[in-house]
Image (cartoon, grey):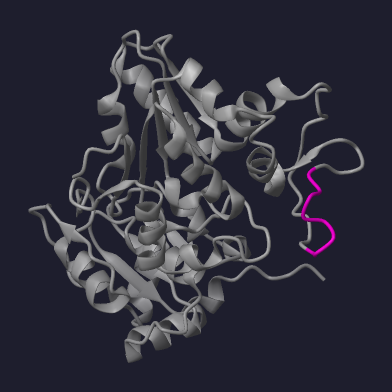
Amino acid sequence: MGKSKKRLIQAVAGSGKTTYLIKQLEESAEQVAIITYTNINQEVLRDKIRKKFGGRIPENIHIFGLFQFIYSFCLTPYLSKRPKGINFDSLTTNASNQKKYQDSSGRFYKDRLSKSLLDYADKIPYISRIDRYFTKIYIDEVQDLGGDDLTWLFSLIQCEAEILCVGDFYQGTFSTSSRGNTNKAAKADYGAYKKKFIDADFDIDEKTLGNSHRCTEETCQFIRERLKIEIYSDKKSHSLEPMLISDEAEIDRVWNDNSIPKLFNQEHYKYGCGYSMNWGESKGLTERDICVVLTSGIKANIINNDWTKVAPKTKAGFYVACTRASGQVYFVEPQSIARYKKKQAK
């Protein structure tokens, strides 16, 4: 580790990313901002902080959604006229609208919030404002930041405040914003992603959260060998290697066990099931056993052990799904569960 106050911890699934951040918190004079993307993760943070501090959140600890922090804390205090809010539709990128930030109703496009700060940093001194109010900035699930939001993150190297980013690049199933090809190459390849942080003078820590407390070594080995993601287990319990089940009776057993979530690439609601969700939505879930419904492409990738043509978002979703289990991972094919598909109303 270097001496930089800016650090990225590249964690693996089940290593306790959020728990690690909570352990860093203290009730003190130091003002801490914790920033994350999803509403679910904000609630998880609040619950864990309350548990640590006897049912309350100390006054020096502040939790923000990413857009809330950029819009309400960094941007609007410097505008002469308060904007009308945020437009969560994406603005199509073309050569003539690169300096367009708001829609006709005066709402800022969510994909252009960070760009407005970056383009007008001389008039919107958000760096000095952050330093005026906070001594530490923690960013959870940092892999979700994309587009200009990632560039905004790199601009925080100018802060005097300590910046700690925690996340798992390979769980990047979301992207907070997009504008043309901005940072798309970095989001598609871990080597390029890591280099971006190094070039921005962040220290990279790949050891602190390098082992999974959730997944068995058999699951981790499958992921290392097939997905080429370096993940190891520190669990003493074991499972069988993730397995494709084709026996009808065994499929019925797994399907009818409502303690086992069925994880689909998409459109999980089309199947009659007591416990199901899509791969990306399962992030943060932990269950003993899980059942992953394969796509035909993913099955071919497993058989051929070739992932070179898989879209990064699809690979990330499959990785997220496989790492939800503390025990056994089952695979099924769509055709083997066709009888469970809901009949469409005529």
Residue 156 shows in the view: yes
Instruction: Count up the numbered dots.
Output: 0
Percent position of residue 142, x then y: 43, 46
Apparent side of residue 232 relative to residue 65 in the rendered image (left or right): left
At 87% from the left and 35% from the top, the residue drawn is: 106
Apparent side of residue 296 relative to residue 238 in the rendered image (left or right): right
Percent position of residue 171, x then y: 41, 57
Q: Is residue 19 above or below residue 14?
A: above
Instruction: Specify the farthest residue to the left.
Output: 236
In the rendered image, which quarter contains the N terminus? top left
At 39% from the left and 11% from the top, the residue drawn is: 58
Apparent side of residue 329 relative to residue 99 in the rendered image (left or right): left
Apparent side of residue 57 relative to residue 206 in the rendered image (left or right): right
Instruction: Specify the farthest residue to the bottom.
Output: 304
Q: Is residue 299 above or below residue 52?
A: below
Q: Quadrant of residue 34?
A: top left
Asked if the magenta segment contains residue 100, the reply would be yes
Instruction: Specify the farthest residue to the right.
Output: 104
Residue 275 shows in the view: no
Instruction: Specify the farthest residue to the front.
Output: 122
- Mostly what secondary structure, the magenta segment? loop
Chain part drawn in magenta: 94-101
Q: Quadrant of residue 228?
A: bottom left
- The residue closer to the viewer here, 137 or 223, is 137
Percent position of residue 215, x then y: 22, 56
Q: Is residue 51 above or below residue 269?
A: above
Q: Is residue 331 above or below residue 105?
A: below
In the rendered image, which quarter contains the C terminus? bottom right
At 39% from the left and 20% from the top, the residue drawn is: 135
Percent position of residue 345, x then y: 78, 67
Asked if the magenta segment contains residue 5, the reply would be no
